[in-house]
């Protein structure tokens, strides 16, 4: 699931111990030479850090508060130390904020109050629902602020690093900073698309809708097959699911418009119709019918 709120090892602390202007670009290090700090060592942060290090950057440290995040840091970024947030910000030319959405703005504001953000420093957050506005306290200090959301589900393992090569990144930033976002996406192995600040909520709805409902439908089908005594339901459904997904992803804009019209007119494509068919076929499918009725809401 694409879920930035899965990084639950981050806990905001009340106190820390201890722009788009073209002039700022003079202080941006050449590609492959940036010192990068990761806040925090969750599933997303460690995977992006691993990919950036493989691209030639130096990961100077990561914030890892919990035992689980420290173990993940050791596995994904061996040799990278767990350090406090102020040290990460002070030593990094690029700071990656891979933390829950609600935590981003308060953290950025606290760092600003400590006077740690500096002109020319790149600050990136990976949340999907919000754009660059939540980084305003850092931007006021002269930092170059971007929102770059990877549209994929993360396991926090090395498998994700390979999957980044087929991942799209939603970049939200002022026009002068968008090339930084595109360059970072390319170094991570993926492609990028610009999403306007005002469009981030709709974008996030689209990717979360896909992640949640595709997974839910497959899980329900697997449960049904298990109830029939089939021991490897995933193997049975894999080819079907992959071909159906490829067919859906190949649908043109005109075809999507026609499909929307069919659904709106109460045709066979509606979730309610699918639910009714399931109920008629067998009362045992009632739990599946409820899923499809919920999708219609």
Image (cartoon, grey):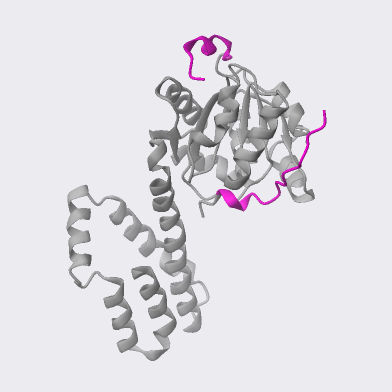
The answer to whether one can see residue 81 in this image is yes
> Where does the image place residue 69, in percent across and percent down from the top left?
73, 46
- Could you tell me which residue is drawn at 64 percent across and 40 percent down? 106
Q: Is residue 288 above or below residue 52?
A: below
For this orientation, the residue located farthest to the right is 18
Residue toward you, 133 or 246: 133
Q: Which quadrant holds residue 83?
A: top right
Q: Which quadrant holds residue 121?
A: top right
Q: Is residue 144 above or below residue 245?
A: above
The answer to whether one can see residue 98 in this image is no
> Where does the image place residue 65, in percent across and percent down from the top left?
77, 44
9 within the magenta span:
yes
For this orientation, the residue located farthest to the bottom is 283
Q: How many marks?
A: 0
> Where does the image place residue 73, in percent across and percent down from the top left?
72, 41
Our reading of the magenta stretch's main secondary structure is loop
Q: Is residue 225 above or below residue 256?
A: below
Image quadrant in which the C terminus is located: bottom left
> Where does the image place residue 9, in percent across and percent down from the top left?
71, 49
231 within the magenta span:
no
Q: Is residue 126 left or right of residue 250?
A: right
- Could you tell me which residue is drawn at 51 percent across and 72 percent down? 232
User: The magenta stretch spans which residues?
Assistant: 4-29
Q: Is residue 58 left or right of residue 184?
A: right
Q: Is residue 22 left or right of residue 142?
A: left
Q: Is residue 98 above or below residue 153?
A: above
Residue toward you, 72 or 258: 258
Q: Is residue 192 left or right of residue 55?
A: left
């Amino acid at each position: 699931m694409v879920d930035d709120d899965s990084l639950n090892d981050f806990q905001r602390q009340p106190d820390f111990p201890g722009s788009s202007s073209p002039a700022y670009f003079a202080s941006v290090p050449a590609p492959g030479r940036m010192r990068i700090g990761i806040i925090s060592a969750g599933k997303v942060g460690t995977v992006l850090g691993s990919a950036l290090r493989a691209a030639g950057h130096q990961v100077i440290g990561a914030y890892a508060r919990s035992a689980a995040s420290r173990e993940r840091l050791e596995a994904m970024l061996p040799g990278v130390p767990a350090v406090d947030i102020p040290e990460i910000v002070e030593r990094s030319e690029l700071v990656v904020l891979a933390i829950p959405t609600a935590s981003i703005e308060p953290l950025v504001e606290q760092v600003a109050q400590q006077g740690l953000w500096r002109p020319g420093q790149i600050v990136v957050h990976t949340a999907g629902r919000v754009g660059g506005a939540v980084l305003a306290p850092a931007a006021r200090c002269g930092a170059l602020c971007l929102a770059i959301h990877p549209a994929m589900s993360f396991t926090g393992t090395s498998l994700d690093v390979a999957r980044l090569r087929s991942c799209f990144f939603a970049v939200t930033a002022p026009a002068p900073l968008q090339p930084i976002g595109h360059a970072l996406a390319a170094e991570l192995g993926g492609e990028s698309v610009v999403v306007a600040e005002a469009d981030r909520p709709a974008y996030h709805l689209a990717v979360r809708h896909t992640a949640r409902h595709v997974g839910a439908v497959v899980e329900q089908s697997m449960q049904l097959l298990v109830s029939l005594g089939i021991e490897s339901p995933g193997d049975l459904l894999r080819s079907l699911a992959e071909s159906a997904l490829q067919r859906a992803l190949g649908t043109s804009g005109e075809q999507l418009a026609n499909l929307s019209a069919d659904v709106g007119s109460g045709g066979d494509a509606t979730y309610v119709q699918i639910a009714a068919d399931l109920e008629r076929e067998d009362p045992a499918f009632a739990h599946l019918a409820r899923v499809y009725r919920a999708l219609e809401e």
